[in-house]
Amino acid sequence: KKKIAVMTSGGDSPGMNSVVRAVVRTAIHFGCDPYCVYDGYEGLVQGGHMIKRFHWQDVRNWLSQGGTLIGTQRCASFFERSGRMIAAKNMVLNGIDALIICGGDGSLTGADKFRSEWPSLLQELVASNELTEQQVAPYQHLNIVGMVGSIDNDMSGTDVTIGCYSALDRICQMVDYIEATATSHARAFVIEVMGRHCGWLALMAGVATGADFIFIPEKPRQDDWREEMCNLVKCHRDLGKRKTIVIMAEGAHDRQGNKISSEMVKDILADKDGLALDTRITTLGHVQRGGSAVAYDRVLGTLQGVEAVRAVLEATPETETCFIAITENQIVRRPLMKAVLDTKEVAKAVRAQDFERAMALRDTEFAE
Ligand code: F6P
């Protein structure tokens, strides 16, 4: 019987529990034994009770729960080859021949490295008498399938990452709350949202809440952004608007690459010689990541979890390692390494202020 393990890795994202539930139940449906690895790669390195056989009922009521119930970590030891060796040994000892990993680009890069090193890791384990030839013989090919769980929506090759719509929804709720108090006091609020190097959450939240001004890393403002912002805010105020909302992506910077902080924006809005607005800062923080998943993320996690198990079962030793994406509303398999490399290139292009290239790379549709 094939043993398929699933793990969640990196920052948690709403919808990860739907992924695990779908993988466990689809694996059982196809006659396989599902396993869960607790705390991401850390569990793979620790082995023992961190790798657990799961049954149908073990994932009951998981759809409505936030976070990841099998835990996650940003695991330092897996970055070392010695850590990956122990992980490989634990996989063989548990008889696991396929691994489904739901995480961000860092976790998926680790997955691809693990897969490419796999034959040499096994050789080394045999050479150092950690495992015998007979033990490793059935596990010559490591079958890995990636799934993208991240609130940032920062992965190339897929339109959406699991969790981003839940985070966006949470941000909108929070902005709605803030708007009530902002309007009452005729105040301005600078609201900082997550996203790391990606401005998707800030941009979409700005559109969804009708914010006055936004800052995102992909399109740094011109040098005169202070005047631009103040003119726009004044124009809105002149039209009778009693509140001002500015949404800041946490990775926002100017054209010179200097960080634009919420404090800087607040000081400009509050400047006594300018708009002199009573201004507050709200950094939303981890409320964006916690809480239950919206329907979209539950459905996405479920459909992609099913597809991930199918991909595992259909893989041959020649199959390129894939991840499960959604493009144009279709659940599809895409080459993992290309997406990981494109994602890194996007970050590089943003740093180099080559925004056209960044946008083109992010939208790469794997044109054949
Ligand atoms: O990648 C997801 C994310 O939530 C980013 O938006 C944010 O920058 C980072 O993780 C926060 O990480 P931590 O939870 O380790 O503080």
Image (tube, grey):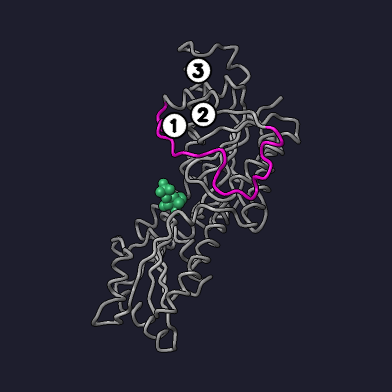
Is-magenta flag for residue 80?
A: yes
Can residue 157 be seen from the camera position used here?
A: yes
Q: Amino acid at mark 1?
A: Phe
Q: Amino acid at mark 3?
A: Gln
Q: Which residue is mark 3?
A: 123
The mark found on residue 44 in the picture is: 2
Instruction: Give the structural element (helix, strand or loop) at label 1.
Output: helix
Of pointers 1 and 3, the one earlier in the residue sequence: 1
Residue 367: percent from the left, percent from the top? Answer: 59, 53
Residue 67: percent from the left, percent from the top? Answer: 54, 47
Q: Is residue 313 left or right of residue 49?
A: right
Q: Residues within 10 Å of mark 2 (few under 14, many from 20)?
A: many
Q: Which residues are magenta?
A: 55-81
Tag 2–tag 1 contact (CB < 8 Å): yes
Q: Residue at x 38, y 69 (%)?
A: 190
Q: Residue at x 64, y 46 (%)?
A: 18
Q: Is residue 97 left or right of residue 131?
A: right
Please tell me whether mark 2 or mark 1 is closer to you in this view: 2
Q: Which quadrant: the N terminus?
A: top right
The mark found on residue 271 in the picture is: none
Tag 3–tag 2 contact (CB < 8 Å): no
Q: CA distance from mark 1 to mark 3?
A: 18 Å
Residue 58: percent from the left, percent from the top? Answer: 67, 36
Can residue 345 be seen from the camera position used here?
A: no
Ligand 1: does it lie within 8 Å of the C-beta at label 3? no
Our reading of the magenta stretch's main secondary structure is: loop
Is-magenta flag for residue 76?
A: yes
Q: Which residue is mark 1?
A: 78
Tag 1–tag 3 contact (CB < 8 Å): no
Q: Amino acid at mark 2?
A: Leu
Check the image and report above or below for 338 versus 175.
Answer: above
Q: Residues within 10 Å of mark 1 (few under 14, many from 20)?
A: many
